[in-house]
Image: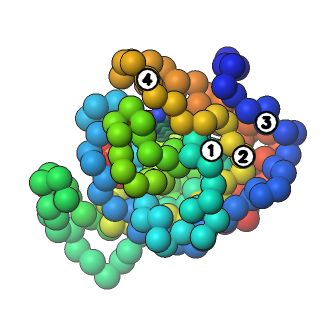
Amino acid sequence: MTRPVDAPIPSEPKRPYPVVTGYVDIVPGFGRGSSALGIPTANVPIEQLPSIFNELPTGVYFGFAKLAKVEQHSSEVVETQNGRNVECNYGQHLEDEELRALPVVLSVGLNPFYGNKFKTVELHLIHKFDKDFYGAKVKFSLLGFIRPELDYSTKEALIKDINTDIKISQQVLGSPEYSRYKYEL
Ligand code: ADP
Ligand code: RBF
Ligand code: MG
């Protein structure tokens, strides 16, 4: 499962990890995660994150994430920057077990495969949800780094690498030295 670009993962989190955020908004991105790759990613505004995110090297990270509903709102359809309509339901359909800490694999980067201009932070929660949860909040930790961001010649190669990232994250986060950090959110 290891690839030449993979960073060695220590037996427990090492400085600067854990990096822990506060609750931040889940906002629409470019709409490619689910539709183009089959791998949805909850995008979060980098401005709401601790300033260390501006300095972190681009790449793939793992940790835990905890979702929260935003109660006082009812669902609304919002138009995104690139003209898509998404249902912003503030997480009202999330079930109790989905509000606990879940394993997460994150992309911090410029997505060279798509040529983004700004650094984006996107979380793929390793859990199958029945519905989207735009407008909900998420608090998360980074516990380690897997690999730098890469450019790919095909979409399939990117998908294959993301699936390997998911497997690595699941394995590491299942170990006692890492899984105890789920209680620190
Ligand atoms: P966008 O470009 O708007 O982020 P995506 O196709 O990446 O579009 O889909 C992201 C949305 O999918 C998230 O905001 C969330 O509401 C939903 N979603 C469903 N399942 C997951 C998951 N396992 N991890 C992250 N987001 C998910
Ligand atoms: N995009 C890239 O261009 N290069 C990458 O190496 C890359 N790695 C990713 C790893 C993970 C675990 C995830 C969730 C996403 C990754 N992406 C990468 C971002 C991907 O292009 C992005 O999620 C989609 O464009 C949807 O926004
Ligand atoms: Mg996304």
State how far apart marks 3 and 2 are (Cα). 7 Å
Q: CA separation, marks 2 and 4?
A: 23 Å
| Between discs 1 and 2, the one toward the N terminus | 1
The residue that mark 3 highlights is 9
Q: Is residue 7 left or right of residue 34?
A: right
The residue at the point 47 percent across, 71 percent down is: 47
Q: How many other residues sit within 10 Å of disc 4, few (<14), some (14-19) or many (≥20)? A: some
- Element at badge 4? loop
For the question of whether residue 123 can be seen, the reply is no
Q: Do residues under tags 2 and 4 come within 8 Å of each other at their CB atoms?
A: no
The correct choice, above or below, for 24 with respect to 165 in the image is: below
> Which image quadrant is residue 139 in?
bottom right
Task: Confirm if mark 1 falls within 8 A of ligand 2.
Answer: no
Tell me residue 63's x, y (percent): 65, 50
Q: Amino acid at mark 2?
A: Gly
For marks 1 and 4, give the CA distance: 19 Å
Distance between the alpha carbons at the discs numbered 4 and 3:
24 Å
Q: Residues within 10 Å of mark 2 (few under 14, many from 20)?
A: many
- Mark 1 vs 2: CB contact within 8 A: yes
